[in-house]
Amino acid sequence: MAKTPDTPEQETAASEEGTQQQQQAPARVALQIDDSGAVANYANFCRVTGTPEELIIDFGLNPQPIGVPTSPIPVTQRIITNFYTAKRMLHALTMTVQRHEATFGVLEIDVQKRVRPGLVAGAAAPPQQQPPAAE
């Protein structure tokens, strides 16, 4: 059972404490989302452009992800958003990638650092020479 304040000073202090707790932990609201009309596409290519008012993000499938593509990359999806939403999206993506890397390890985004020598034609490492045995 909650204790009622005995004096106006105690009531003010209790009110200020409650306000501080509300400011520290905003209540989460459960949103209802209908994604029945959503279309899912895979993309391994992303281009970001924009204007002073909006951000344009194009997604596509690059059939030649290593090296310079020899044909145009078809853009299949375009998202146009304002910078406030983009910043919220950046925060959400940053948190998600940080959690993934904490669980599974760092994601290397430089393809050349991920490719193992010998798996890609022309990228084989020269054979290692053994130093002469000391006598």
Image (cartoon, rainbow, N blue to C red):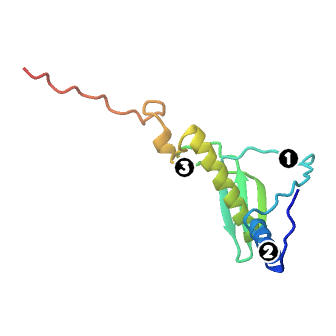
Q: Is residue 61 left or right of residue 104?
A: right
Amino acid type, label 1: Val
Which residue is identified by label 3? 68
| Label 3, label 2: how far apart the Cα atoms are | 71 Å
First of labels 1, 3 by sequence position: 1
Q: Quadrant of the N terminus?
A: bottom right
SS label for mark 2: helix
The one of 12 and 36 positioned closer to us in this rendering: 12
Extreme-top residue of the structure:
135
Q: Residue at x 87, y 48 (%)?
A: 38
First of labels 1, 2 by sequence position: 2
| Label 1, label 3: how far apart the Cα atoms are | 29 Å
The one of 5 and 20 positioned closer to us in this rendering: 5
Question: Of the numbered discs in the image, which one, if any, rests on residue 125?
Answer: none
Q: Nearer the viewer, mark 3 or mark 2?
A: 2
Q: Residue at x 62, y 43 (%)?
A: 100
Check disc 2: other Cα within 10 Å, few if <14, some if 14-19, many if 20+.
Answer: few
| Label 1, label 2: how far apart the Cα atoms are | 57 Å
Which residue is identified by label 1? 39
Check disc 1: other Cα within 10 Å, few if <14, some if 14-19, many if 20+.
Answer: few
